[in-house]
Image (spheres, rainbow, N blue to C red):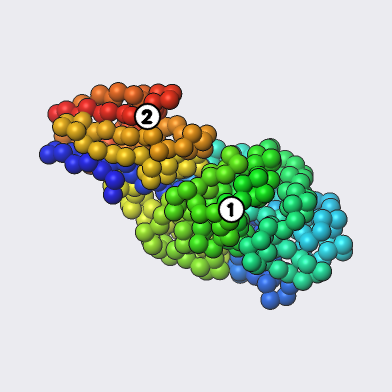
Amino acid sequence: MKSVRFEHYEVSLPKPLFLVVEDVGWWQGYDGSEKNEPYRNNFPRRQCLADYRALARLAEQLSMRIALGMVLGEWDRTNFLKDVPGATWMGASWDNRINQGPWLDEAADYLQEKKEQFEIALHGICHEFWQDGRMQRSEFHDGEDKMRPKELVRRHLDAYATLLDQNGFKGFPRLFIPPALHHSFGNGKDSIQAVLHDYGIEYVTTRFSRARRYSEPIHPKLTWECGVGILERGLSPVDWDVPASLPVWNEPGLILPLHWGNLLHPDPDSNAEVIDSWTSMILEKTRGIERILSEDLASCWRQAAAFFLARMSREDRKVCLDLRDIPDQACFSGAFFLKIREEKPVDITCIGAEILLDTVTPDRIRTLKLLPEKGRQEIVLAVSG
Ligand SMILES: [Zn+2]
């Protein structure tokens, strides 16, 4: 833990935790990978509005705008994907009528209504890529983590934008979650990050050990290129194809990556039972000063930079935070949080940052949100009491 301890209190720079739910958006539940179709959620029924309500419940209980890694191929209302090379298993004879119905409007309206709870993240059109009609992993990178030709990647991103537009979702996502963890970074202007940034992507999360690294990340868990901040995703605590999972805590890193089916019940009326067991575990595990639940994507990225790169030390009765290693990148700079375990209330004066928020729980865990002054590289907190 990154903290400094005094006689009656301890100040920490807590590690963030942010929830990402992948493979949201399928209408069909079954895993099609055995018959040249996508890896879906291996869920024993069709997906429905109640499955989005479950996600809103999760977000509300955690007070977090959770990220939904969405696959939108089955939201195609006009079958235009027949003209997008490699986008579906049916190729030029793509026909999505089975998924076109009133549930599209219903779910689209609901996602719009709950936009404060959901950050729609780019995951893919149909997750995989069909080369000469045969399914390959994955949509934007091949099985050896080589990016598909840039023009093809752009074609798929344009199609994703059309799918968003057809369904009334405003704007392009800020976050990309590579499908099946096939990704690459470290090759600058030739990287997929350069392409993604043109579309408005500012954040990526994936497993560094699985990606092709043209150069090493700047920090083992965090790096950036072409205006995109990349964070280590870590391991899912549960396999992607396990429906209605009991909660599992695997001492996650910065991200808790789950798959939609993990959080849903075969009987949609019982979805809340699955959600509630996960949220009570997550809230319990992040109550202390070691961790903090991030309110949203941007807050997680900033907290991660502070957690890994800020230096924290004690000088007499002061806490000093040296921020000089935090890069001057929009996604990593700005407000971050400290937590204090105090035996009794203490007074805090802060030099070099504005305290935007100061809250305390009944068991005396205090949370401070600090906004460093522009250009400031050192913050000093004087604590007394
Ligand atoms: Zn996926």
Q: Where is residue 82 in the image (x, y as percent from the top left)?
A: 84, 58
**Marks 1 and 2, Cα distance to the nearest angstrom?**
28 Å
Q: In the image shown, does 358 or 278 lie closer to the viewer?
A: 358
Q: How crowded is mark 2: few (under 14 residues within 10 Å), some or many (20 or more)?
A: some
Q: Do the residues labelled 1 and 2 touch (CB within 8 Å)?
A: no
Vertical relation: 244 (above or below) 233:
below
Q: In the image shown, does 334 or 110 lie closer to the viewer?
A: 334
Answer with mark 1 or mark 2, whichever residue precedes in sequence. 1
Can residue 102 be seen in the rendering of this structure? no
Q: In the image shown, does 308 or 382 lie closer to the viewer?
A: 308
Vertical relation: 312 (above or below) 80:
above
Q: Does the residue labelled 1 lie within 8 Å of ligand 1?
A: no
Circle 1: element type: strand
Q: Give the left or right position of residue 63, taking residue 320 as reference.
A: right
Q: Position of residue 15 (x, y in %)?
A: 36, 47
Mark number, residue 377: 2
Residue at 78 percent across and 67 percent down: it is 131
Mark number, residue 185: 1
Mark number, residue 91: none
For badge 1, the amino acid type reads Phe
Q: Give the left or right position of residue 228, taking residue 74 as reference.
A: left
Residue at 32 percent across and 40 percent down: it is 311
For badge 2, the amino acid type reads Gln
Q: How crowded is mark 1: few (under 14 residues within 10 Å), some or many (20 or more)?
A: many
Q: Where is residue 261 in the image (x, y as percent from the top left)?
A: 56, 62
Q: Quadrant of residue 381?
A: top left
Instruction: State the quadrant of the C terminus.
Output: top left
In the image, farthest residue toward the bottom: 34
Can residue 385 be seen in the rendering of this structure? yes
Q: Where is residue 128 in the image (x, y as percent from the top left)?
A: 69, 63
Residue at 32 percent across and 29 percent down: it is 379
Residue at 69 percent across and 40 percent down: it is 198
